[in-house]
Amino acid sequence: MANPNNFPIRLEQVFFTRQIVIAVSGYVLPKDGDSAKVLLPTNTITVHPVPQRPNAYAVTMQTIFNPEQDVSAPYSVDMECHAIFVAKEGTPEENVQTALTITGHSVVFGAIREAVYWMTGRQPYGPMPLGLSILQPVSPSSEENS
């Protein structure tokens, strides 16, 4: 088993700066045999150094689902979660960035998924589970257009 002390980063803190879950007025559950319209969340993740904190990095993820409050979906969601990590001294920057991206994504999306499920479970249409969030590279042309 690998020594956990050799991992290049450690988690320091996880917190939310936005937690908005709105039950969409007018939503009607699909009837038996009808398929529900599929609305997918938009997930945006960033990794950046924490100012004035050497070796500290923030991973921020925003998940937005149904911002137009389309009545074909039960909820509108806007969540933003942050995780603060500290990198081990002397670790190559490439290793730090890889660990931050993969581990940070897992930490913040897991927190968002849990929060959405818990919050929607106490709303009129019942809990809304989020599926997987898969990291995919962003092409330079799509970054320029956003």
Image (spheres, rainbow, N blue to C red):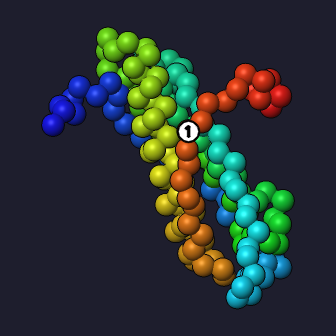
**Looking at this view, is 49 or 129 the one in front?**
129
In x, y percent, where is residue 106? 45, 44
Q: Quadrant of the N terminus?
A: top left
**Measured along the vertical axis of the image, is residue 62 above or below residue 36?**
above
Which residue: 43% across, 14% down? 93
Can residue 56 be seen by looking at this rendering? no
Q: Position of residue 51 (x, y in %)?
A: 54, 20
Q: Nearer the viewer, residue 77 or 133?
A: 133
Locate residue 78: give its quadrant.
bottom right
* Neighbourhood count class around disc 1 (C-alpha, 10 Å): few under 14, some 14–19, many 20 upward: few
Identity of the residue furthest to the front in this view: 33
92 or 86, which lies in front? 92
Helix or strand or loop: what does disc 1 sit on? loop
**Which residue is found at the position 66% from the left and 80% from the top?**
125
Snapshot quadrant of residue 46: top right
- Given the image, on which type of amino acid does mark 1 rest? Leu
Q: How many discs mark residues in the rendered view?
A: 1
Residue 94: image location, x then y, percent: 44, 16
Figure quadrant of the C terminus: top right
User: Relative to 63, is 142 on the left or the right?
Assistant: right
Q: Residue at x 17, y 31 (%)?
A: 3
Determine whether 106 is above or below 26 in the image: above
The correct choice, above or below, for 20 with respect to 95 in the image is: below
Say which residue appears at 70% left-offset and 26% top-offset.
139
The residue indicated by pointer 1 is: 135
- Left or right: 18, with 71 as reference point: left
Residue 5 in view in this figure: yes
